[in-house]
Image: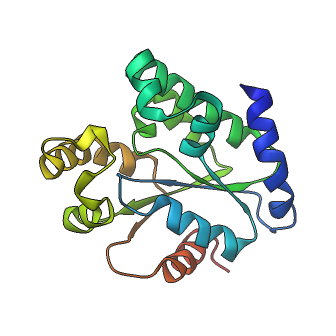
Amino acid sequence: MAGALEARLAASARAGEDAGTRRGLVLVGPMGAGKTTVGRALAEATGLAFVDSDDLLVQVHGPIPAFFAEHGERAFRAEEARVIEHVLSRAVPCVLASGGGAVLSPGTRSLLSRPEVAVVYLRVTEAEALRRLDSGAGRPVLAGDPAGTWSRILAERDPLYHEVADLVVDTTSDPARELAWRIVEGICPR
């Protein structure tokens, strides 16, 4: 797995080498909070490389729902934790969009508490998240009762998002670029 991750990260790492920050920026939050969209805008604003942990998992293991079905949640969370540890152990900082459930792993929460990592919790209203997620289409975990399931998952994870967060930003209504600059100002004040 490390070889595949190295290949994926090596191409983008050079973008962050001269970014002027020694901290990695990690975005956490529920499905539909905008971790990927805001993460890309944040990478552009800071000059850091952008990495999406879900994308890396897919590149290494194939579709996440299939991996989940074949190996179970425990194996998935272990792989997710290894991906995040690998990304955060690199000498070059980056913007990392984590999976919504990454905070469920005590080991991942420990990684996110390191001083060289800045964690931003992206919050969003249920209505906006479900709009962004097309009411759960393509998200097997939301099948049947998208709103109820999304709310239950958030209630379980919200304390963990707060536990690891250095900054909390609501993404419900502002454009990604504005949110990116708000994060830069909140994490890297002049």
> Image check: 182 left or right of 121?
right
Residue 159: which quarter of the image? top left
Residue 113 in view: no
User: x, y percentage for residue 109?
Assistant: 49, 37
> Image check: 142 left or right of 75?
left
Residue 14: which quarter of the image? bottom right
Using the image as rendered, state which of residue 20 and residue 137 is in the foreground: 137
Residue 152 in view: yes
| Residue at 57% over, 80% down | 181
User: x, y percentage for residue 190?
Assistant: 68, 80
Asked if 26 appears above or below 156 in the picture, the reply is below
Pick the quarter of the image with the N terminus: top right
| Residue at 40% over, 39% down | 101
User: x, y percentage for residue 169?
Assistant: 41, 69
Using the image as rendered, state which of residue 122 and residue 113 is in the foreground: 122
> Image check: 116 left or right of 135?
right
Total count of labels:
0
Asked if 147 appears above or below 15 in the picture, the reply is above
Image color mode: rainbow
User: x, y percentage for residue 19?
Assistant: 80, 68
| Residue at 67% over, 67% down | 43
Using the image as rendered, state which of residue 13 and residue 113 is in the foreground: 13
| Residue at 35% over, 52% down | 31
